[in-house]
Image (cartoon, grey):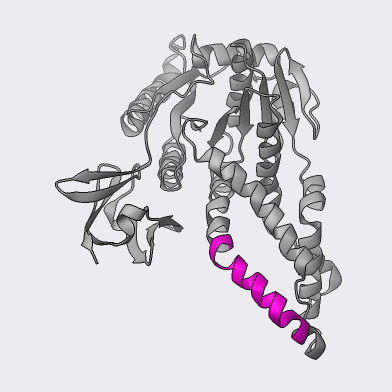
């Protein structure tokens, strides 16, 4: 199965450049590499200075690129569900054109990228797939959707399908309310199965790594730290930080002294805050980075002699262990403050909330019958202690 490398960061930090350069270095290391973009802005083609289509296009030896056609994926994967939603909106009084627009959920085009990723993983054509993700907010929505959808499909989908099958015929005789039929539920099941298959790959730290791209700027670093926390909450493995656009040592003009001092301070903050993750540094380029030669030089500076396909840091965002006769569930939550973490229990699930993000963690069998005795947030970790069975 192919290795998956996800590169993300705040808009404008150079994540597309980093993704393109990473793909070229993977190919140089001998890996059959595909680089694809889930960013609606689609700047991957601009980075390579060549046309990229909706299907993989050869860029150089052992590397191809792809920019997903969101509209085509929408029509192929969402048409049945879209038709039902449009009919439902019109039934409640929404005009036809507005109903058509409302039937496409915000950010849905990015979600279909996960389906394409599954197809590429199963094709056997690639050793490495590099994903140029959308900016961090969209990436978080994209990566957390499978977890949220999984919760809905496991609990509400079977009931909704059964209710529709039993009550639907009676409703159709007494009201004009559009009732979803078996084709709608089958379409949703197929959509979910594709997303769920990718979720298992992305949550496997032996197969998938996330790399955060930052610039030496306070706001960029702050957003990267929040992203790291949320990715860890949902079980994604971050294995490196790319510090891009650092002022090179060769610049000696006094006008840049304040900037160089600021960059040095921010770099120290990055290395301290993200430790033990490796921080890969790249100097500010003297000109715009576009084309294979420029990107390859960028990649050489970024990775040196390293093989980019190999995980650069190994860790376990979530693990269960025994300590002093008690069971402890440890969740890595880098940079999370104890005041912003909320914890609750509902049946077999542990509900963890940080800010506006919540994850429902299905407890393993060894913990389901035990009561939560204590919970502590310390040094980027949430430790939940389980006592005797209740």
Which residue does the image show at 75% across and 38% down from the upper left?
68
Please identify the quadrant where the C terminus is shown: bottom left
The picture places residue 208, in percent across and down from the top left corner, at: 52, 32
Classify residue 226 by image quadrant: top left
Q: Is residue 58 left or right of residue 143?
A: right
Which residue does the image show at 61% across and 20% down from the upper left?
21
- Is 169 one of the magenta-colored residues? yes
Q: Is residue 7 above or below residue 383?
A: above
Q: Is residue 308 left or right of residue 170?
A: left
Q: Is residue 235 left or right of residue 284?
A: left
Q: Is residue 77 above or below residue 300?
A: below
Which residue does the image show at 61% across and 28% down from the upper left?
130
Dominant secondary structure of the residues highlighted in magenta in the image:
helix
- Is 377 one of the magenta-colored residues? no
Foreground residue among 210 and 285: 210
Classify residue 69 by image quadrant: top right
The picture places residue 85, in percent across and down from the top left corner, at: 76, 68
On the question of residue 304 being in view, the answer is yes
Please identify the quadrant where the N terminus is shown: top right
On the question of residue 216 being in view, the answer is no
The picture places residue 22, in percent across and down from the top left corner, at: 58, 21
Q: Is residue 55 above or below residue 108?
A: above
Q: Residue furthest right?
A: 96
Foreground residue among 148 and 184: 184
Q: Residue furthest bottom?
A: 174
The residues colored magenta run: 153-170
Classify residue 128 by image quadrant: top right
Count of numbered circles on the image:
0
The picture places residue 65, in percent across and down from the top left corner, at: 73, 26
Q: Is residue 107 above or below residue 228?
A: below
């Amino acid at each position: 199965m192919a290795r998956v490398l996800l590169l993300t960061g705040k808009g404008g930090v150079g994540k597309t450049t980093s993704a393109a350069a990473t793909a070229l270095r993977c190919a140089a290391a001998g890996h059959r590499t595909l680089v694809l973009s889930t960013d609606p802005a689609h700047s991957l083609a601009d980075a390579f200075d060549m046309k990229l289509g909706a299907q993989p296009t050869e860029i150089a030896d052992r590397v191809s690129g792809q920019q997903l056609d969101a509209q085509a994926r929408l029509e192929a994967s969402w048409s049945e569900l879209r038709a039902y939603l449009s009919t439902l909106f019109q039934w409640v009084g929404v005009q036809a054109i507005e109903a058509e627009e409302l039937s496409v959920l915000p950010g849905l085009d990015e979600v279909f990228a996960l389906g394409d990723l599954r197809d590429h993983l199963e094709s056997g054509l690639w050793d490495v797939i590099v994903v140029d993700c959308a900016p961090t907010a969209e990436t978080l929505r994209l990566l957390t959707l499978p977890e949220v959808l999984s919760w809905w499909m496991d609990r509400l989908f079977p009931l909704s399908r059964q209710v529709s099958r039993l009550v639907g015929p009676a409703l159709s005789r007494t009201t004009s309310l559009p009732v979803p039929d078996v084709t709608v539920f089958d379409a949703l099941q197929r959509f979910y199965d594709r997303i769920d298959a990718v979720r298992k790959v992305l949550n496997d730290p032996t197969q998938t790594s996330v790399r955060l791209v930052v610039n030496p700027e306070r706001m960029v670093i702050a957003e990267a730290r929040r992203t790291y926390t949320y990715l860890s909450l949902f079980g994604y493995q971050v294995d490196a930080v790319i510090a891009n656009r650092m002022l090179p040592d060769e610049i000696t003009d006094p006008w840049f002294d304040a900037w160089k001092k600021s960059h040095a301070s921010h770099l120290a903050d990055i290395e301290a805050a993200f430790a033990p993750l490796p921080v890969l540094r790249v100097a500010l380029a003297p000109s715009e980075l576009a084309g294979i030669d420029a990107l390859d030089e960028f990649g050489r500076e970024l990775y040196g002699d390293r093989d980019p396909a190999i995980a650069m840091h190994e860790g376990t965002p979530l693990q269960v262990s025994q300590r002093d006769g008690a069971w402890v569930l440890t969740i890595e939550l880098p940079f999370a403050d104890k005041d912003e973490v909320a914890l609750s229990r509902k049946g077999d699930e542990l509900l963890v909330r940080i800010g506006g993000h919540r994850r429902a963690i299905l407890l393993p069998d060894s913990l389901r019958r035990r009561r939560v005795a204590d919970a502590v947030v310390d040094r980027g970790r949430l430790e939940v202690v389980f006592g005797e069975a209740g």
